[in-house]
Amino acid sequence: MTKFLSAAAIVILLGCNSFQKTPDISSIEVPLTTVRYEQDFFAIDTLRLDVSLQKLAGQHPLFTQDFLYNILATTPQTAATDVPQFINAYQALYKQTGIKYASIAKQEAAIKQGLRYVKYYFPDYKLPTKLITFIGPINSFGNIITIDALAIGLQMYLGKDNPIYLSEEGQSLYPRYVSRRFEPEYMATNCMKNILDDLFPLQDAGAPLCEQMVEAGKRLYFLKQVLPSEQDSIVTGYTAAQLEGCYKSEKDIWSFFIQNNLLYEKDPSLIGDYMQDGPNTAVFGDASPGFIGQFVGYRMVETWIKKTKETSLEKIMKTPAKTIFEQAKYKP
């Protein structure tokens, strides 16, 4: 298989919005209140823990339950030990995030903008009304969606070169190709992924590779529609050089799948080579991105949209992957 062509200086942009104008969302109001939960949590009096936790639950009734029992993974029986231990262990990290994220106004603005687009495309969807920041264990969640909120674990956004991630323990949890995305620029995209999963839960298990690629392509298309100003490298999770390499090698990538009769493959272990994150896709060389099936699927979706002139994001997302694959007749 021909390896990826070396990347040049030009950055190629995904053409998501080449089929329709970006809608005017300036009149759409999105009430979103930012809650700095980590500040209230780390302020609790561990010497009067029961009273402090009751007060915290009164201030943040829904999220406190999520935080204690799902994120912190404590129990009512062990909280008296677990909570003080966590506060003590993460005190330095809390101070660090307090400096780095004294304000999250920029990230909040990007998330609100994304929610405006979501409201435009899906007016009946009930948007979250809160943006909650928290600090959880390093091996826990970075982003979650609750009944009324988008929640962001700041411990996962300390910057790709933070010693916590580069330590032996950190790299065992999050290899470099993962931790390079632990930057504030990824917050809005990750929040919109939560919205996407809520609107359209992924249900492609058991589907052939071609359909799984199209589903991934549809999801990338969704993200580009609700974050039209976001850098493509942020939305795809690829580096700019990897994305450019995909375009330069597009014909070779497609030929590989055709020549090796992979499109209708259903073996999960084989499909994983192309549909899971990784430092690269081995058969395409070190310069390629992992999860390369996302790019192929996205290009199929683009081709289908050009042919059908479909502009409704809801219809695009609800169109079966098999239909898009068969009607697109993608051939780069």
Image (tube, rainbow, N blue to C red):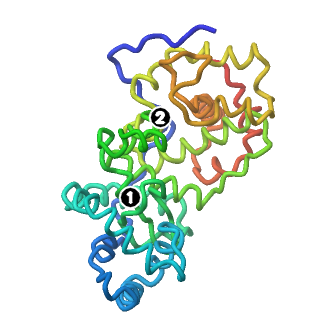
Determine which quarter of the picture holds residue 281.
Answer: top right
The residue wearing badge 1 is: 25
- In the displayed structure, does residue 176 sit left or right of residue 158? right
**Callout 1 secondary element:** loop
For the residue pair 82 and 145, the one nearer the viewer reads as 82
Dot 2: few (<14), some (14–19), or many (≥20) neighbours within 10 Å?
few
Badge 2 amino acid: Ser
Q: Residue at x 43, y 49 (%)?
A: 189
- Identity of the residue drawn at 41% across and 44% down: 228
Ranked by sequence position, the earlier of labels 2 and 1 is: 2
Give the x, y percent position of residue 191: 45, 56
Q: Dot 1: within a 10 Å radius of its alpha carbon, few (fewer than 14), some, or many (20 or more) residues?
A: few
**What's under tag 1, amino acid-wise?**
Ile
Where disc 2 sits, the SS reads: helix
Classify the position of the C terminus by image quarter. top right
Q: Residue 292: where, in percent of width, then height?
A: 58, 28
Numbered tag placed on residue 18 in the rendering: 2
- CA–CA distance between discs 2 and 1? 18 Å
| Residue 319 spot, x, y in % from top left | 71, 47
Q: Is residue 49 visible to the viewer in this orientation of the structure?
A: yes
Q: Quadrant of residue 182?
A: top left
Left or right, residue 248 beside residue 315: left
Q: Residue at x 37, y 43 (%)?
A: 165
Query: Number of labelled discs?
Result: 2
